[in-house]
Amino acid sequence: MHSSQSDSDSRLARLLRRPWFLCGLLSLAGVLAAVPALSGQRKDDLLRLGLGASFGLCIGLLIVIEAKRGISRIAKVCIQTLIGGSFGMVLALLEGFDLTKASLSIVVGLILGASAKYWIDHVNLP
């Protein structure tokens, strides 16, 4: 019985080390975190679920890039900056921001992506 327990533990550990599984898990967590905020209006509910999923995916991608070995520090910062800017753009599109708010959203996303090295370790995974 102990052997089957350790086999299942090692399978789970291998699964959790896969970057795309982690991204999918965090996207699902983002969707589930948005569920309590659902208002019953279809458009708003889909918007909240989309924001939750894209936020979870963004955090998952930032974690995966930061943990990936064999990538230079400069490449990591560039990739994370693009991920952050992309999330800012998705946020602006989903929320229907005007040009000023959309630009600010993208700039904040770029800054958060570029500085991910300093804050990503403080994100508590579900």
Image: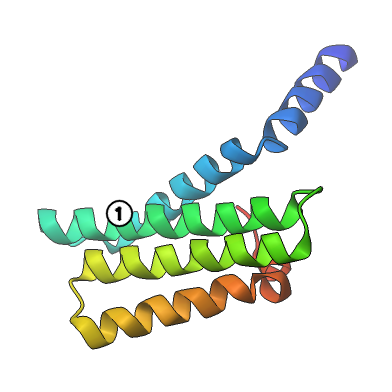
- Left-right relation of 32 to 15: left
At label 1, which amino acid type do we have? Leu
**Vertical placement of residue 76 versus 104, above or below:** above
In the structure shown, which secondary structural element does the residue marked by tag 1 occupy? helix
Can residue 111 be seen? yes
Q: Splitting the image into 4 quarters, where does residue 77 fall?
A: bottom right
How many marks the image carries: the answer is 1
Q: Residue at the location (55% across, 68% down)? A: 81
Residue 66 point in image, percent of width and height: 71, 58
Residue 58 point in image, percent of width and height: 50, 58
- Left-right relation of 88 to 11: left
Q: Splitting the image into 4 quarters, where does residue 62 fall?
A: bottom right
Q: Which of the colour schemes (rainbow, by chain, secondary structure, one colour) is used?
A: rainbow
Q: Splitting the image into 4 quarters, where does residue 12 fall?
A: top right
Q: Residue at the location (55% across, 59% down)? A: 59
Which class describes the residues within 10 Å of circle 1: few (<14), some (14-19), or many (20+)? many
Residue 48 point in image, percent of width and height: 28, 60
- Left-right relation of 54 to 48: right
Q: Residue at the location (40% across, 55% down)? A: 54
Q: Which residue is mark 1?
A: 49
Q: For the view shown, which residue lies furthest in the bottom direction?
A: 100
Q: Nearer the viewer, residue 17 or 83?
A: 83
Can residue 40 be seen? no
- Left-right relation of 10 to 20: right
**Vertical placement of residue 61 versus 17, above or below:** below
Residue 38 point in image, percent of width and height: 24, 59
Q: Residue at the location (38% across, 51% down)? A: 31
**In the rendered view of the protein, which quadrant contains the N terminus?**
top right
